[in-house]
């Protein structure tokens, strides 16, 4: 083991590690500490960890795709949502095109970096690139646990990012994320004049509660408390491949589990919906022995199955177009609109985030800051309008 003092005054010790079972090359182990003895101890511990052994026979033959398959078998049983599993599987299909057939021990840091660069050049989105890196890292973490590698080559790889132009930054308006009052009025009016089944119920509910689309789709009548004008949020609808294979899962965080106070007008809308639904039950349940009676607030009349968030997304965009709005968005725009309504009503940021079930949200904070900044500017203009003459008097005097 060799040691040297660095320019910063700390000690760096280094030694050759065991041979890699695939490349047969040694890797230098370097560790730093304020004291020489501590740096030496760190190197010693690292060497001991490496000496615990690699499954040399298996490591020379098993491919990345095989390790990924083994990891996925464990991952899908770890309690993650089915939609998350499907997302990881989709990411692995892309990754396997680059080195699925390569022995896992021969994949280098540069190969992974080249993959990310190639994906970027091919126009993959930021989220897909991030997903590819994270998924690859998970697989190599699994390979280390299975003693197939001594390192994780994903470490310190860089996900390429497109640098925004000045024009893009200037055109990126926070106001595009929510409806102004007149736009919301047009949207809800379109729900009355052009709305399809449930449009007159779920869109006002989204706009005046701020709940997520998945939370609305998962809502059951046992979550609606007519006596106290409250709605309970305890679950969300996982993305579904078909109508019958839906999955109800807990929200993303504990903060998302909440009770929402609702005004009497929205509760009146829900009461009317409940009455209509009871009529549908009498009509369709008798003729359909496979009727899915799970008490969903929003369900398909003929079979009782809930709606997907994708369905709601399409319905929202349809009404945006019917209303002649320039903002053609999914249901999330109503959630953002609710945040602006709360801000305009002078509700504090913490209370807003509690109501919409956010632990920390950049969008919520940006909208809040944008609205409050405009209100402050408006306040200054009002003061100037009403009391400006007093200032002129002072100046002239």
Image (cartoon, helix red, strand yellow):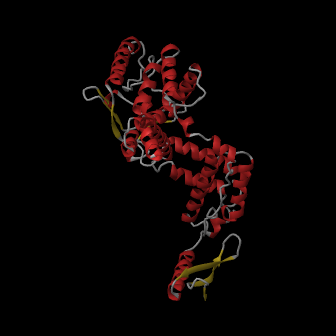
Apparent side of residue 111 relative to residue 205 in the rendered image (left or right): right
**The N terminus: image quadrant:** bottom right
- Is residue 397 visible from the viewing direction of this image? yes
- Is residue 236 visible from the viewing direction of this image? no
What x and y, as percent, mark residue 387?
A: 41, 38
- Write down the quadrant of residue 348 in the picture: top left
Apparent side of residue 289 relative to residue 88 in the rendered image (left or right): left
Apparent side of residue 334 relative to residue 226 in the rendered image (left or right): right
Apparent side of residue 67 relative to residue 348 in the rendered image (left or right): right
What x and y, as percent, mark residue 205?
A: 41, 27
Out of 384 and 154, give the one closest to the viewer.
384
At a point 44% along the width and 38% down the height, the residue shown is 389
Out of 235 and 320, give the one closest to the viewer.
320
- Write down the quadrant of residue 175 in the picture: top right
At a point 70% along the width and 59% down the height, the residue shown is 113
At a point 45% along the width and 16% down the height, the residue shown is 302
- The relative height of residue 59 versus residue 326 in the rendered view (above or below) is below
Out of 150 and 313, give the one closest to the viewer.
313
| Outermost residue toward the left in this view | 227
| Outermost residue toward the front in this view | 397
Q: How many marks?
A: 0
- The relative height of residue 98 versus residue 198 in the rendered view (above or below) is below
What x and y, as percent, mark residue 157?
A: 65, 61
What x and y, as percent, mark residue 340?
A: 45, 36
At a point 45% along the width and 26% down the height, the residue shown is 306
- The relative height of residue 388 versus residue 28 in the rendered view (above or below) is above
């Amino acid at each position: 083991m060799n040691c040297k003092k660095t320019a910063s005054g700390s000690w760096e010790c280094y030694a050759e590690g065991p041979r890699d079972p695939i490349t047969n090359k040694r890797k230098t182990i370097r560790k730093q500490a304020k004291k020489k003895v501590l740096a030496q101890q760190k190197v010693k511990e690292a060497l001991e960890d490496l000496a615990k052994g690699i499954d040399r026979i298996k490591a020379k033959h098993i491919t990345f795709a095989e390790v990924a398959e083994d990891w996925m078998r464990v991952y899908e049983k770890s309690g993650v949502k089915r939609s998350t599993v499907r997302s990881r599987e989709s990411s692995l299909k892309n990754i396997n095109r680059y080195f699925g057939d390569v022995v896992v021990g021969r994949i280098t840091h540069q190969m992974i970096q080249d993959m990310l660069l190639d994906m970027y050049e091919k126009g993959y989105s930021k989220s897909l690139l991030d997903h590819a890196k994270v998924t690859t890292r998970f697989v190599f973490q699994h390979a280390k646990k299975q003693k197939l590698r001594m390192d994780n080559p994903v470490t310190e790889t860089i996900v390429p990012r497109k640098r925004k132009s000045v024009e893009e930054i200037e055109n990126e308006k926070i106001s595009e994320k929510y409806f102004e009052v007149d736009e919301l009025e047009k949207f809800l009016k379109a729900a009355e004049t052009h709305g399809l089944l449930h449009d007159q119920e779920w869109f006002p509910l989204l706009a005046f509660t701020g709940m997520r689309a998945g939370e609305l789709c998962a809502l059951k009548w046992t979550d609606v408390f007519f006596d106290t004008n409250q709605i309970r949020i305890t679950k969300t609808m996982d993305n579904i491949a078909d109508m019958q294979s839906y999955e109800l899962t807990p929200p993303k965080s504990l903060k998302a589990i909440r009770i929402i106070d609702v005004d009497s007008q929205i509760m009146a809308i829900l009461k009317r919906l409940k009455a209509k639904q009871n009529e549908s039950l009498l009509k369709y349940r008798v003729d359909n022995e496979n009727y899915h009676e799970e008490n969903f607030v929003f369900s398909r009349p003929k079979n009782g199955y809930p709606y997907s968030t994708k369905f709601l997304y399409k319905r929202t965009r349809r009404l945006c177009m019917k209303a002649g709005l320039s903002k053609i968005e999914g249901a999330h725009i109503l959630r953002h609109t609710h945040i602006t309504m709360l801000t305009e009503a002078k509700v504090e940021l913490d209370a807003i985030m509690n109501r919409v079930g956010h632990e920390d949200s950049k969008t919520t904070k940006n909208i809040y800051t944008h609205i409050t900044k405009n209100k402050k500017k408006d306040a200054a203009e009002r003061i100037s309008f009403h009391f400006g003459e007093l200032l002129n008097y002072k100046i002239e005097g």
